[in-house]
Image: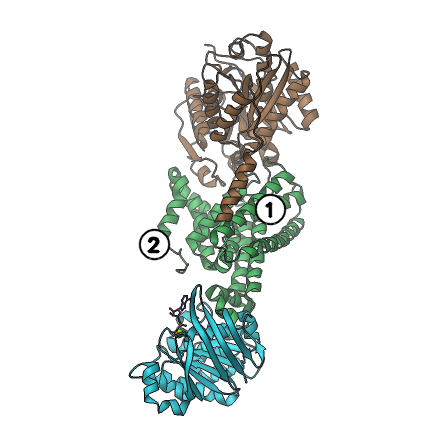
Chain colours: A green, B brown, C cyan
């Protein structure tokens, strides 16, 4: 029974991680840019929502409105990031990653300067602050639901629409995509913008779960990186499975072997990489 | 890659800029070097620390021991290497008479070593590592062991003699506090705790899997968490309904001022053992809390109180005159907002501990744990 | 003149591959580009498509300069390529590939399915689940749906079973009736002669021989010299 609760709880964290990591994996897969600002975008989402809502408990409508606004701001930040990376195209992974890291530090220090370096959280919106079945927080159920909906939408767009086909084609062979007359840069930009919007949105979604504080950006970035290393680059399915696996390792895994908690995640990552160096759903690149 | 190196060089240059010029020793002023985390994970505590020290000086006409005082603040960024470097700078370049501050224990260990080499006394305003000490090291906060020990004695008396489960972050402060608890609990006649649950330090974002380890026969839980983990723990404990199943006793950090706002309503009713409460009824505390509130609008945190007392100890010692390191050990009883305390042979405080229940926005004192008669 | 290439040079880094290639092609005509492995045939068609940047020389399509334009612009001007190795989008289904390749014009998805019934049967299959022959059909369909004025084909018969090469010959020969201009890089002489009006042979990044297809077919010495024995 208690393990079932652990497993369910793992779903909640997995859902949150998925929303964060799916953008990171697509951006890396498509633009070949390891966006180390992804954690800072998550953090920005949380802090902006905190500034908008003032840390008080608010109605679900207001909360959702703030989340959408924050996602839109994330899209705008994605635009800034793209513009900043543009001059470094073709300069290699390290230069680009370093640039995103620098921007990430600027962004997170700016946020800490605007708010403060202390701890902050936001309670769940009204109506989602209770618990179900006696003692399971309702908000976590809502996070799972949100993860399912967002995952469903992302999957549908990616696998079932023309836009999604363009994105996949740009991962498969950008040169040939250009050769049939498609503006590959625009496809890439849309992925960058959407990924950044999802990252800031995840920051709002995770607000009642993970405290706002200095260092939050790198903490979630590491988790998202582990998700895409496990799942494989540029794969939606990889992001889903990787996020769920990380979620379960951190709940069920920890409950089964608490004394190994600090190493479990890295052990699982190493095991997956030994089995397939490109991750579970990755392709050799 | 060349660009990266350049950027790195610029960053390093910016960080180390402004080399201080050598200053001559000057006996007419008391120079206090405060090593404080102004950046890094502990920077929120650092803000309180610096504010309290400046408040003390402002309230005492900028003087310590009757002489004009100067506070030189250096940022340790939360790392021992930086702390040690700043200690060297403060002693050699700024020629401070005493070093204080020190939030994290690893930083305090490195700084104490450096200060001992430079023959400069150290007054620790926060770091709790049990092993920290030395002839020139004085502590106005507490040791982790004593923090847990006091809670253990109280639990044996009020929570029952068996059924204890301990939980805490897996690093020195956590394990030392829990060890102190277990021994204090045994001293009070309590049975060996049923279980000790350690969680990876600084990495735990979800305590649900650990809370589910608590055995069904548990009667109460004693926990040690600080900072962000304290917030997450307090919220998880309540959200998963453990507050209705299990009595909880915590370290003082879980309901300290730096985290209370973030915990919000879930902090209501938490019982903790700590060395201070803003609600303590004594003249020193009334004056202190009034001044602090006027300046910050908040209740003073434990770190604020300790930092105030660090300045107070230096003030008393400077008043005695002579060698400051020696004087620091001879001050005797200090009238503190926490109640009077003295330093023992190892320069650690002998003090009251308070059982506090958080309700209506303040930690109300519900019991006092006096020092053990030795 | 549909296509006029003059003194084209291109390469990779410091290695120059094309050393001044010249070629002209009338509208509705097909030219076969022949030559041994590694002479620069692929580099030549890639340069036409903008997949390799020419370092000098000019490429004019119906009078419009292509040299220096990026691949997408060149594609928009009516050039399509069926690349060597097919390069089908491996995670896209046949239907999806054709869908994103569509442009207004005579070629429609339905018409592609008509000339390649095998593709119609596999429309829900991903690119990496197709056989080599099916991938070739998909690559050709993808190019035709751009309704190009100029079609570049780079060794379409490579790796195909003889029966499939024959089918391919029928389809490509049929294209000539549509008025499209074709540059066909081939090692398979029979297919090249079946499809092309003219033949150009490349040696070390230059065209050194040109003739009408029928003429070349009878020139045993040229065949031996430019294609190697036994072709
Ligand atoms: N991407 C590349 N980078 C470097 N050299 C290449 C590349 N592609 C081809 N080459 C070289 O350029 C020369 C011409 O190659 P290619 O145009 O593919 O010849 P062909 O198609 O006639 O076989 C060869 O020597 C080949 O090794
Ligand atoms: Mg070739």
Which quadrant is home to the C terminus of chain B? top left
What label sits on residue B330 in the rendered view?
A: none
Does residue B220 appear to the left or right of A80 in the view shown?
A: left
| SS category of the residue bearing label 2 | helix
| Crowd around label 2: few <14 · some 14–19 · many ≥20 (10 Å) | few
Residue A198 in the image: state x and y as whole percent: 57, 54
Discs 1, 2: same chain: yes
Farthest left residue in view: C230
Q: In this view, does B362 lie above or below B135?
A: below
Towards the viewer: A240 or A220: A220
| SS category of the residue bearing label 1 | helix
Q: In this view, does B267 lie above or below B127?
A: below
Evaluate if marks 1 and 2 touch, with contact meaning CB atoms under 8 Å apart: no
Residue in the image at 54% along x and 68% along y: A161
Residue A239 in the image: state x and y as whole percent: 47, 55
Residue B147 in the image: state x and y as whole percent: 49, 22
Towards the viewer: A32 or B369: A32
What label sits on residue A275 in the rendered view?
A: 2
Name which quarter of the figure residue C116 lies in.
bottom left
Answer with the quadrant where ligand 1 appears in the image. Answer: bottom left
Label 1 vs 2, first from the N-terminus: 1
Residue C127 in the image: state x and y as whole percent: 43, 71
Calculate the distance from the C-alpha at mark 1 to the C-alpha at mark 2. Answer: 36 Å
Q: Is residue B322 above or below residue B142?
A: above
Does residue B198 appear to the left or right of A100 in the view shown?
A: left
Towards the viewer: B18 or C194: B18
Tell me the residue that label 1 is attached to: A44
Residue in the image at 43% along x and 56% along y: A232
């Amino acid at each position: 029974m208690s393990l079932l609760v652990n497993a369910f709880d793992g779903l909640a964290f997995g859902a949150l991680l998925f929303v964060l990591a799916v953008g990171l994996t697509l951006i890396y897969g498509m633009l070949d840019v390891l966006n180390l600002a992804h954690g800072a975008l998550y953090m920005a989402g949380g802090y902006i929502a905190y500034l908008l809502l003032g840390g008080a408990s608010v109605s679900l409508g207001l909360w959702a409105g703030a989340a959408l606004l924050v996602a839109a701001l994330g899209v705008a930040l994605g635009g800034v990031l793209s513009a900043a990376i543009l001059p470094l195209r073709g300069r290699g992974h390290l230069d680009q990653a370093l640039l995103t890291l620098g921007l990430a530090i600027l962004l997170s220090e700016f946020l800490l300067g605007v708010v403060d370096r202390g701890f902050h959280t936001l309670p769940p919106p009204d109506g989602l602050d209770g618990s179900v079945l006696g003692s399971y927080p309702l908000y976590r159920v809502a996070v799972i639901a949100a993860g399912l909906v967002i995952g469903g939408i992302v999957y549908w767009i990616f696998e079932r629409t023309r836009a999604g086909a363009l994105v996949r084609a740009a991962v498969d062979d950008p040169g040939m995509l250009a050769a049939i007359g498609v503006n590959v840069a625009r496809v890439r930009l849309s992925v960058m913008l959407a990924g950044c919007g999802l990252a800031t949105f995840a920051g709002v979604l995770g607000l009642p779960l993970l405290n706002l504080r200095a260092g939050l950006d790198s903490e979630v970035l590491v988790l998202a990186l582990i998700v895409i290393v496990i799942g494989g680059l540029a794969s939606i399915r990889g992001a889903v499975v990787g996020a769920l696996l990380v979620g379960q390792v951190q709940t069920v895994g920890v409950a089964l072997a608490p004394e190994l908690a600090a190493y479990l995640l890295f052990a699982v990552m190493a095991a997956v990489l030994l089995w397939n160096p490109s991750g579970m759903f990755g392709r050799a690149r | 890659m060349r660009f990266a190196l350049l950027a790195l060089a610029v960053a390093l240059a910016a960080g180390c800029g402004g080399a201080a010029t050598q200053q001559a020793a000057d006996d007419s002023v008391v120079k206090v070097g405060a090593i404080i985390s102004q950046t890094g994970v502990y920077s929120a505590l650092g803000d309180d620390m610096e504010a309290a020290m400046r408040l003390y000086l402002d309230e005492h006409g900028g003087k310590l021991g009757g002489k004009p005082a100067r506070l030189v603040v250096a940022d340790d960024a939360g790392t021992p290497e930086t702390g040690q470097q700043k200690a060297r700078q403060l002693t050699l370049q700024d020629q401070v008479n005493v070093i204080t501050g020190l939030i994290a224990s690893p930083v305090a260990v490195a700084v104490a070593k450096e200060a001992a080499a430079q023959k400069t006394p150290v007054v620790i305003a926060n770091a709790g590592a049990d092993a920290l000490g030395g002839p020139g090291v004085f502590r106005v906060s507490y040791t982790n062991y004593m923090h847990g020990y006091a809670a253990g004695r109280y639990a044996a008396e009020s929570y029952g003699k068996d059924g204890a489960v301990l939980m805490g972050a897996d690093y020195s402060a956590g394990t030392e506090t829990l060890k102190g608890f277990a021994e204090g609990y045994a001293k009070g006649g309590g049975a060996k705790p049923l279980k000790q649950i350690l969680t990876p330090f600084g990495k735990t974002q979800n305590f649900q899997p650990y809370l589910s380890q608590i055995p069904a026969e548990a009667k109460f839980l004693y926990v040690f968490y600080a900072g962000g983990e304290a917030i997450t723990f307090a919220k998880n404990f309540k959200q998963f309904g453990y507050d209705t199943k299990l009595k909880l006793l915590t370290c003082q950090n879980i309901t300290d001022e730096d985290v209370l706002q973030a915990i919000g309503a879930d902090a209501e009713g938490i019982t903790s053992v700590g060395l201070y409460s803003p609600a303590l009824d004594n003249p020193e505390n009334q004056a202190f809390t009034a001044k602090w509130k006027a300046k910050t609008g908040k209740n003073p945190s434990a770190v604020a109180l300790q930092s105030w007392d660090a300045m107070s100890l230096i003030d008393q010692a400077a008043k005695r005159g002579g060698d400051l390191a020696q004087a620091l050990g001879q001050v005797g009883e200090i009238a503190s907002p926490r109640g009077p305390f003295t330093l023992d042979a190892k320069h650690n405080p002998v003090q009251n501990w308070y059982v506090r229940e958080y309700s209506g926005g303040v930690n109300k004192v519900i019991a006092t744990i006096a020092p053990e008669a030795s | 003149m549909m296509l006029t290439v003059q003194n084209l040079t291109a390469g990779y880094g410091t290695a120059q591959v094309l050393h001044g290639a010249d070629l002209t092609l009338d509208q509705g005509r097909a030219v076969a580009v022949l030559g041994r492995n590694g002479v620069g045939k692929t580099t030549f068609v890639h340069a036409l498509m903008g997949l390799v940047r020419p370092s000098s020389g000019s490429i004019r399509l119906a009078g419009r300069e292509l040299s220096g334009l990026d691949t997408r612009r060149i594609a928009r001007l009516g050039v399509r390529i069926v690349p060597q190795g097919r390069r089908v989008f491996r995670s896209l289904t046949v239907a999806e590939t054709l869908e994103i390749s569509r442009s207004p014009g005579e070629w429609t998805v339905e018409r592609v399915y008509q000339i390649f019934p095998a593709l119609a049967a596999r429309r829900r299959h991903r690119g990496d689940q197709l056989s080599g022959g099916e991938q070739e059909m998909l690559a050709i369909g993808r190019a035709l749906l751009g309704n190009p004025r100029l079609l570049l084909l780079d060794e379409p018969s490579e790796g195909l079973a003889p029966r499939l090469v024959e089918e391919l010959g029928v389809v490509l020969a049929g294209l000539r009736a549509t008025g499209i201009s074709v540059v066909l890089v081939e090692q398979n002489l029979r297919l090249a002669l079946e499809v092309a009006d003219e033949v150009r042979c490349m040696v070390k990044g230059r065209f050194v021989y040109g003739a009408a297809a029928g003429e070349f077919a009878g020139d045993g010495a040229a065949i031996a010299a430019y294609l190697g024995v036994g072709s």
